[in-house]
Amino acid sequence: MLTQVLLQLVVVVTLMVLVSIAVFVGRYRLRDTRLEWRARIRAAAPVSALLAAVLLFNSVARQYGPDVSWIIHWNLTWPIYDVEGEFILWLQSFEAPAITAYFSFIYIYGYVFLLVFPVIAYFALSNTRPLRELLTAYTLNYVLGLGLYVFIVAYGPRNMMPELVDALLYDTYPQYQHLTRQVNRNTNVFPSLHTSLAATVMFLAFRTRAIYPKWFLLATGLGVSIAISTMYLGIHWAIDVAAGIVLAYICVALAHVLVGRWSFTAWVASLRDSSTSTGADTNTGANAGFPKTPPSESTSKSHSHSDSDSEPESETGSDPEPERA
Amino acid sequence: MLAATAGLTVSTSGCIREIRSIVNRNEVEQLSLTISTVPADGDRESIQLARAVGSALESVGVDIAIDMLSHEEFRRAILVNHDFDLYVGPHPGDTTPDFLYELLHSRFAEEAGWQNPFGLTTLSIDDRLEEQRVAENGGEDDENGDREDAITATLESVAREQPFVPICRPTEIRLARSDRFEGWGEGHPATRFGYLGLEPESKDAAAELRAVNTDARPSQNLNPLSAEYRERNLVVGLLYDSLAVARWRGDERPIAGGEQVDADTGTETNSELDPDSATDLTPWLAADWEWTDDETLHVTLREDCAFHDGTPLTAEDVAFTYEFLADTTRGSRRFSAPTPHYRGRVDAVDDVTDLSETELEFTVGTSQPVAERALEVPVLPKHIWDERTAQASLPGVTVAEGTTEALVTDNVPAIGSGPYQFEDRTDREHVTLARFDEHFTRRDGVDLPEPTSERLRIQIDPRSTSAIELVESDSADVTLSTLESYVVDDVFEDDGDVPETTILESPSWSFYHVGFNARKAPFTNPRFRRVVAQLLDKEQLVEEVFHGYAEPIATPVVEEWVPDSLAWNGNDPETPFLGTDGDLDVAAAREAFEGAGLRYDDDGNLRVRH
């Protein structure tokens, strides 16, 4: 059951990504990517490794997080319900099978696509900064979001008002329950990570709107739809969504500040430099796409940079490592 | 000057005294209550009932908050810590009314588990319960009186006091695959007999019986004594044996609009039986028992039984079990820690002596039917549980007195002697049991339902809809937990489309109720409790929350024991609803509260010292 749903997800999202590459990325960027991919991967490797580590930790933490949450026992369900009242019910009053189908599709497929595609789209840019900012922002989302989950116990509207919340994803499409329960625990609704990750992509798409103007439009449409879908499907409260947007803003702002501040390769290089200068030379100098920058310079350098990818070499070879490494 | 001061002192002293008597009166504040309950995942009904109770109380001027707790936390708050105002949830119930003894007797008010969680301390109820405990069947002329009369008297007193409001008894609906197994419904599916004696119809089925459960707790903890994790003890019933087992007669009627209900399996004859007919107590681990006199029960065990780890099961283990359940510290501490489960059953036994490897003698202080309930407790291996009498410890944490390791261990792997043994589990995913081939039911000459499939895999799936899908798509054979009532209509509709499935409809002895914490004002006041009971239209709740798949009740026992005076008559005979068709007559309800001595302020808030 699970493999079938997963397979379907992979196929659909792959198709969406392929079409989007054709529409948004274009042939020329792909051609450049073919030439420069090694350098770009090297640039994004440290933060990717960090993200992978956080995701791995995430899967473990989700297992034990709820036990810790219940020991702390800070239950926000009733305060949230008390404050926002029956907004979710108002939203659900627009219920129609077509709308439910749309939002269910968006919640599962649209969401995964929205997270996956910008990784590819930004990878296709010679300037690796947007990619690194994106991955850093993802990492921050998980770190901060999980931190909040550990402290806060809150159940979503579907657990509070099961009879009133009609358009339930898991009743309309029970098969998705197998998928989402692998990653979600029912006490983890504040804030909405669906919303915050979607909003993160949206905010970054706004920043890169000069490069990908059409993608910005699509990301906005999808992001807004995802935020609404979490409420429409009875999974999140409006307050969770609002908190998710705030979290996304913080993550994007932090990512902007943090990316480029620390250089992993430069740090490695400096280590090597101190032992043998020739070793460092052959290592970093091998990369044709990146001018070699002395480590002392790259660590202190502040990045003034534009989002245009017309200046592919505006970045130094320094690799980012966010604070939380 | 002096005179003037003296005069002033005299004139103000009266004034100050008045100020003092004004200022030192405490404010009577608006009554503010928290309703504890569980979230909709896995129990859609409780939260809906809780919100209905909440809005009824709000309309009569009470400030309400709802505290949603996970299943474990809910039970810990209600059953262990007694930290609640009022709660809504199911009680596992029982087939006989004898569970009321431990549920309501004041001497259990300090204990954990379904032992008087309400903290009710009413001498008249204690008296009724004690009379019920000793009254014999057909004992009208006996000094101890007649059991049925005694039960009626208890039920009437309980209804009058309303320590909790029984709301309804749900109908248990499950879905099973009739193409894989035959014999569904010959035993009640809330008991081990629902899963023993099934006839596999294919090799696959003989290899594995695939059940799906919406409650994740069996995958997390297999401790038969856990107050938080055990509900109806189904998995415990498969892993552990008891001396005797209750079998629900006239059990199941697979009803459905499909040809899969074969007339030749005897379902027709079954359905003629009264669904609420009594249960039989069948010898299980005990080969037989005999009353040597009114107070002495002689029990003979089956020969050559063993636990799953190969240790022989002897009378010593049985005697140990009864001692241990009465106090899991085994006397090592002054502060005893009795089991939260089986408490009333064990309490009937004054003494157990093992006469030989297979012979035991029980001395009891109750009537025979009550004492025989004691035979239903799971027999624990002494060599494992004797090690668990110490106080649980955690570095740097003061552990609550009475928290023995036995009460908090997850008991994985569970070593019992039951028809299935523990094999494997993954938290929130599955618990898998393997057939215990040496179990006595598999011996020749033992005419009891035996485990047929080699393995029993209980998969966890938190929603009824996805559980149904697993059964319909042949990924599971049966839903272990009952289906939530909102999907039942759909299941009946779909049933014609999937002819391989069959619907199991069984009566239930569990019931939904609103429990009050009688330790706290204003729930200390039975008049207040009675008016709260009258705010609920049980009939309407059954329609709206249970979609009709439940029976409204005025008393918490199975139909067989309901006295005429408490039979449902379209309304509650004891605490009739103050209103009509679900609409509460708010003015009448407020008047009823005032009649009970409570007061409203000018804004219509109910003000109570609490």
Image (tube, coloured by chain):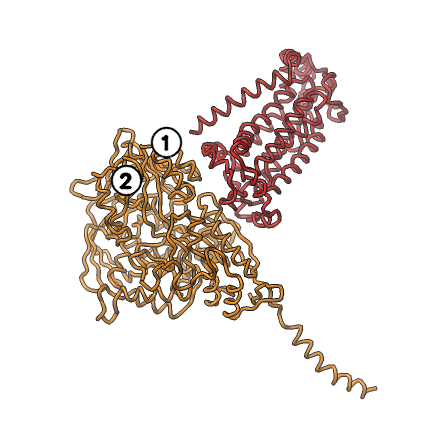
> Sequence order check: which comes first, mark 2 or mark 1?
2
Name the foreground residue: A42 vs A236: A236
State whether residue A216 is above or below residue B63. Answer: above
Count numbered badges in the picture.
2
For badge 1, the amino acid type reads Ser
Classify 10 Å Cα crowding around label 1: few (below 14), some (14-19), many (20 and above).
Answer: some
Per the image, the residue denoted by label 2 is B184
State whether residue A173 is above or below residue B26. Answer: above
Name the foreground residue: A237 vs B70: A237
State whether residue B127 appears in this view.
yes
Residue B507, x across and y down, in percent: 32, 49
Q: Quadrant of the N terminus of chain B?
A: bottom right
Q: CA distance from mark 2 to mark 1?
A: 17 Å
Q: Secondary structure at mark 2?
A: loop
On residue B475, which mark appears? 1
Q: Chain of mark 1?
A: B
Residue B553, x across and y down, in percent: 38, 57
State whether residue B332 appears in this view.
no
The answer to whether residue B179 is left or right of residue A232 is: left
On residue B543, which mark appears? none
Look at 57% across and 28% down and name the residue there: A110
Q: Secondary structure at mark 1?
A: loop
